[in-house]
Image (cartoon, rainbow, N blue to C red):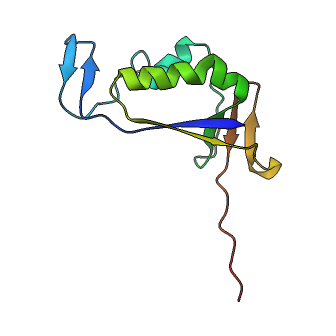
Amino acid sequence: MIYRILTSAPDRYWSLERGEYVNEASPLLGAGTTLGGVMWALHLPAPDIANPRARFWFTERGWDRVGREVAAEARRRGHVVKVIRRKNPRPSQIVFADEWQVALLPETARRQTG
């Protein structure tokens, strides 16, 4: 099983600079305060993937070590969080894989005949 975290952009977020909640769309605040910063703090490797269509999913081990904490932190920061689970992908979709994460290309639409 692999897991992907989807979040909404909150209309209200915690401003570290102001020390209070701010009622506006959350800007990209930098590595220390984004969810990417949470993954960095938890020592998740960040491979350099050239294909912009690739999407990252957590492996079972990555979900237990990093993903659960990232999802919890997103909720604490006011995001609406949805976790998608799916069975392991086809080998042809895999761009990168390690013990914590898998980068996948999206499935292609099959041409309909008829």
Q: Residue at x 42, y 15 (%)?
A: 32
Q: Is residue 24 left or right of residue 79?
A: left
| Residue 27 drawn at (x, y percent) | 29, 30
Residue appearing at x 63%, y 35% in the figure = 3
Q: Position of residue 62 (x, y in %)?
A: 67, 23
Kindly tell me whether residue 100 is visible in this rendering: no
| Quarter of the figure with residue 102 | top right
Hey, which quadrant is residue 88 in on the image? top right
As displayed, is residue 56 above or below residue 62?
A: below
Asked whether 41 or 75 is in front, the reply is: 75
Q: Is residue 18 left or right of residue 50?
A: left
Q: Position of residue 44 (x, y in %)?
A: 62, 19
- The tally of labels here is 0
Q: Quadrant of the N terminus?
A: top right
Identified at 82% across, 47% down, the residue is: 91
Q: Residue furthest right?
A: 91
Q: Which residue is more in the foreground, 98 or 87?
A: 87
The one of 106 and 10 positioned closer to us in this rendering: 10
Quarter residue 10 falls in: top left
Residue that extends furthest to the bottom in the rendered view of this protein: 114
Residue at the (17%, 29%) spot, across then down? 23
**From where the camera sits, is residue 61 visible?**
yes
Q: Position of residue 31 (x, y in %)?
A: 44, 19
Query: In which quadrant will I find the C terminus?
Result: bottom right
Would residue 41 appear left or right of 86 to someone viewing this image?
left
- 72 over 108 or under it: above or below: above
